[in-house]
């Protein structure tokens, strides 16, 4: 390791101002700090600092996403061979899944990080770690048959217009990963809706066994085919078609546990989001105007990307409400609207994406009211003092 | 019966190098008074190099408040007047003659004096700078009438000295000091004590409150917030507990005796213990043969709020602790990816949280690069105040004075944000931001 350090120290001057590779300063910096925690020390204020940094934080989030990714890879193979009516071994399924999923992950990271590096160099700051998570979230919310070029375009769109246009990581209004998905949804609706895209190879439709439709539970529910919904077990463990990372609720809950135990994901948003979803479902149950409205809360919550959205998307600290009380309101409304949009929206079976994006817009407003109440409390204190 | 206030939010940082509970005498050869210790003071010198001074002799005064003088802690000669960039007055060094001659002011009984003459006496004896005010944490304005005076008789910061142990040795002098302060306010004098310690409990004439919980439970700012929060236009005075003893000595003995007990702490000190010396003592001789390694950071004060000083530097006017910790100027291979059994963190992202009682050796490494303020909900967990820390910090950054006022800038001091700075994922210098905010408001209001 000493040799590597010495090598880095040797080439470092060339990347400094006036050096040969000055234009690659941010790139060198990103690689160096990736390999080594910098030797920078405190200069003023607190002389000691917590061991945590943004790299560690983002790493924990990626660890929380790994169970969903691994299950998604296996499920891609499982659904594929199911659609063909073939028996396949575990390794075959994983193998097929890897071939389908890994390229999406690679393309998402490569295209998004390229933009991040360019902007970091252009703006003269260090490369932010935010995209490490976005780059993993984007593949997980994609259907497996998505064309790779579309992933690249969506990632680049999300980073430039979703993040850099607002000033970079920490300043963005919308969750970049959700924006990437919304971009594809509005730009190329054919590739992200319908029954055939959720199962690997089904788009081409060759050799599919009779009776296999590939429809997601949400599509079935929207069609009113409540009796054809998968069992609670299948919904929970995830043996169903859907976006790559959203199907297994077990994997998502493992991720949620990691985020909550480490304190990195907001449990307030997760809990209130779930609560919001359940409350909306119960309201629907009370009216039961159509078949969709009669679905019980447990099934509603287990269907689609509701849990994935509440655990990994709504909790994004930058685009969520920032005050603790605001987080309760924000999460509740996100869950509430997710189910509402899902049931009422005729064109698109899932509401989680649009509900969270909507709440991203309102997060600053929610915070505003929380801040105002804090200010009022302070003013009231002063006023009561004047009287006495 | 005194009340107990339970503080839930906060963090105790367990460091190696706690001082052994034995007090030795430390005869320093040199002492210094550092104008930079006093926020907002524009010093004008009253001595020149070579002058003979006594303990209590004026050294400089504030250009804009001439009657507030800053005096020599010991007797001897002015050895050097040190200036820094732009001729900023940094240190006035006095070499001690070991006689400890002091100016005789005569004994006074605070109970038979009125407020004005007490203030006059404190200013004349050079003790006034020990009385500071909130908001802004600057030297109190003698013309103000504070709504209360707060004294925290315990320090909860890392490796902090045990103030109860120090003060109970001079309990009567301490009581005289409290009597003096009681005359200065129409409100109450509040004494904050740690829960479970009774050495200082039961003092008459003051309102005693016990505090339980982690740091910053001992911060006077937290006490004020819990008992008598500061609204716009109000002023609260605060005095360090050991300075109350010095005030008591002035009235009981009639002279300025600046002796204080300081704790020499930190993982790089071979024999961490307490020393009795005078204010502004040189720390040079304390370090001789007492360091475990050479690449170290010397801090006057504690690791969260103290000043970075040189090895041949002097203890700060308001400090009662010297901490020496290792410098952290090294590269750590994949440091962010290790399990981290040995890495202290407030978050639970490292396995060290499985051993909460373990004591750590922390160095000055930042443990990461500076980033945008991404994480939310962290700051709130270590600030036991009804203040929105993230929003207040941001209002200071954009210098929006009206918003700062609304969000409670008058109630906070930079030291209250020290823990926030410690746990901050984005490695922002938050205490500096708060200080700039306070300075801005102070200039705007004066």
Image: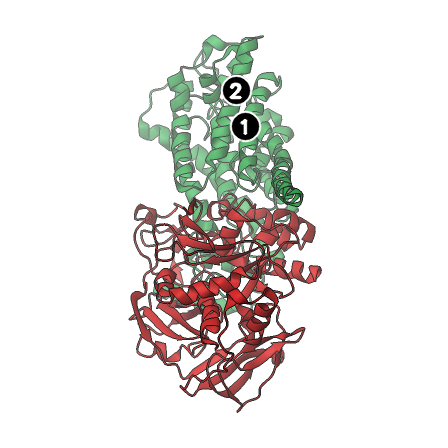
Residue B346 seen in render:
no
Q: Which chain is red?
A: B
| Element at label 2 | helix
Write the residue at 60% across / 84% down: B46
What number is the disc on residue A185?
none
Chain letter for the residue marked with disc 2 in the picture: A
Q: Quadrant of residue B38?
A: bottom right
Give the answer, above or below, for where A187 lies relative to B237: above
- Residue drawn at (47%, 55%) of the image: B206
Q: Are marks 2 and 1 on the same chain?
A: yes
Q: In the rendered image, which quarter contains the C terminus of chain B?
A: bottom right
Kindly state the secondary structure of the residue where label 1 is placed: helix
Task: From this view, report whether residue B54 is shown above or below residue A124.
Answer: below
Q: Return the mark for residue A332.
A: 1
Q: Which mark is residue A279?
A: 2
Q: Is residue A77 visible?
A: yes
Image quarter of residue B21:
bottom left
A222 relative position to B294: left or right? right
Left or right of residue B343, residue A100 in this image: right
Q: Marks 2 and 1, Cα distance to the nearest angstrom?
A: 9 Å
Chain A drawn colour: green
Image-based side of A247 in relation to A372, left or right: left
């Amino acid at each position: 390791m000493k040799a590597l350090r010495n090598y880095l120290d040797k080439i470092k001057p060339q990347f400094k101002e006036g050096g040969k590779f000055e234009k690659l300063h941010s790139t060198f910096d990103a690689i160096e700090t990736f390999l080594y925690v910098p030797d920078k020390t405190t200069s003023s204020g607190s002389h000691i600092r917590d061991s945590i940094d943004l790299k560690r934080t983002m790493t924990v989030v990626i660890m929380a996403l790994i169970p969903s990714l691994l299950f998604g890879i296996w499920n891609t193979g499982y659904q594929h061979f199911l659609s063909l009516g073939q028996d396949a071994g575990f390794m075959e399924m994983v193998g097929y899944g890897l071939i389908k999923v890994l390229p999406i992950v690679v393309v998402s990271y490569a295209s998004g990080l390229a933009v991040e590096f360019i902007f970091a160099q252009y703006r003269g700051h260090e490369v932010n770690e935010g995209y490490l998570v976005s780059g993993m979230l984007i593949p997980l919310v994609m259907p497996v048959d998505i064309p790779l070029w579309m992933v690249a375009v969506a990632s680049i769109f999300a980073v430039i217009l979703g993040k850099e246009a607002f000033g970079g990581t920490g300043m963005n209004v919308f969750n970049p990963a959700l924006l990437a998905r919304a971009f594809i949804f509005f730009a190329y609706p054919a590739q992200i809706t319908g029954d055939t895209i959720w199962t690997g190879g089904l788009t081409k439709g060759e050799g599919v066994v009779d009776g296999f439709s590939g429809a997601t539970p949400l599509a079935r529910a929207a069609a009113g085919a409540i009796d054809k919904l998968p069992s609670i077990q299948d919904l929970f463990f995830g043996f169903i078609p859907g976006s790559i990372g959203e199907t297994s609720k077990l994997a998502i809950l493992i991720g949620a546990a990691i985020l909550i135990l480490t304190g990195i994901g907001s449990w307030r948003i997760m809990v209130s989001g779930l609560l919001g979803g359940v409350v909306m479902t119960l309201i629907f149950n009370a009216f039961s105007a159509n078949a969709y409205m009669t679905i019980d809360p447990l099934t509603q919550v287990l269907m689609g990307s509701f849990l994935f959205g509440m655990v990994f998307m709504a909790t994004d600290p930058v685009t969520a409400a920032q005050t603790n009380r605001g987080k309760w309101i924000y999460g509740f409304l996100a869950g509430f609207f997710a189910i509402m949009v899902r049931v009422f929206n005729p064109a698109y079976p899932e509401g989680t994406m649009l509900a969270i994006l909507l709440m991203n817009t309102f997060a600053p407003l929610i915070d505003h009211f929380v801040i105002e109440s804090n200010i009022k409390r302070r003013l009231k204190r002063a006023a009561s003092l004047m009287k006495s | 019966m005194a009340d107990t206030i339970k503080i839930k939010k906060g963090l105790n940082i367990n460091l190696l190098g706690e001082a052994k509970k034995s007090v030795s005498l430390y005869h320093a050869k040199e002492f210094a008074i550092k104008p930079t210790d006093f926020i907002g003071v524009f010093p004008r010198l009253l001595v020149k190099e070579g002058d003979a001074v006594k303990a209590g002799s004026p050294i400089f005064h504030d250009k804009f408040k001439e009657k507030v003088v800053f005096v020599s802690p010991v007797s001897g000669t002015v050895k050097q007047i040190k200036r820094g960039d732009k001729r900023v007055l940094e240190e006035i060094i006095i070499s001690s003659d070991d006689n400890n001659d002091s100016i005789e002011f005569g004994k006074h009984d605070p109970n038979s004096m009125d407020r004005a003459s007490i203030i006059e006496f404190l200013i004349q004896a050079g003790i006034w700078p020990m009385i500071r005010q909130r908001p802004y944490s600057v030297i109190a304005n003698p013309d103000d009438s504070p709504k209360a005076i707060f004294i925290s008789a315990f320090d909860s910061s890392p490796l902090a000295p045990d103030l109860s142990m120090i003060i109970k040795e001079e309990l009567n002098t301490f009581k005289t000091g409290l009597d003096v302060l009681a005359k200065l306010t129409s409100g109450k004098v509040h004494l904050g004590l740690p829960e479970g310690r009774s050495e200082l409990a039961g003092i008459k004439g003051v309102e005693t409150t016990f505090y339980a919980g982690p740091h910053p439970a001992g911060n006077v700012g937290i006490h004020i917030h819990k008992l008598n929060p500061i609204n716009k236009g109000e002023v609260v005075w605060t005095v360090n507990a050991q300075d109350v003893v010095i005030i008591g000595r002035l009235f009981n003995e009639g002279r300025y005796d600046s002796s204080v007990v300081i704790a020499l702490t930190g993982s790089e000190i071979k024999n961490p213990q307490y020393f009795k010396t005078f204010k502004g003592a040189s720390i040079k001789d304390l370090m001789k043969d007492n360091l475990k390694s050479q690449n170290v950071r010397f801090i006057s004060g504690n690791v969260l709020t103290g000043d970075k000083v040189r090895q041949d530097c002097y203890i700060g006017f308001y400090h009662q602790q010297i901490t020496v910790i290792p410098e952290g100027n090294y590269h750590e291979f994949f440091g962010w990816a290790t399990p981290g059994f040995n890495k202290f963190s407030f978050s639970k992202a490292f396995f060290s949280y499985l051993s909460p009682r373990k004591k750590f050796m922390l160095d000055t490494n930042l443990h990461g690069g500076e980033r945008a303020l991404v994480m939310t909900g962290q700051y709130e967990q270590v600030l036991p105040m009804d203040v929105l820390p993230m929003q207040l910090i941001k209002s200071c950054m954009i210098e929006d004075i009206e918003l700062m006022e609304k969000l409670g800038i008058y109630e906070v001091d930079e030291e209250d944000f020290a823990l926030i700075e410690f746990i901050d994922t984005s490695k922002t210098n938050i205490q500096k931001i708060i200080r700039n905010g306070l300075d801005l408001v102070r200039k705007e209001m004066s």
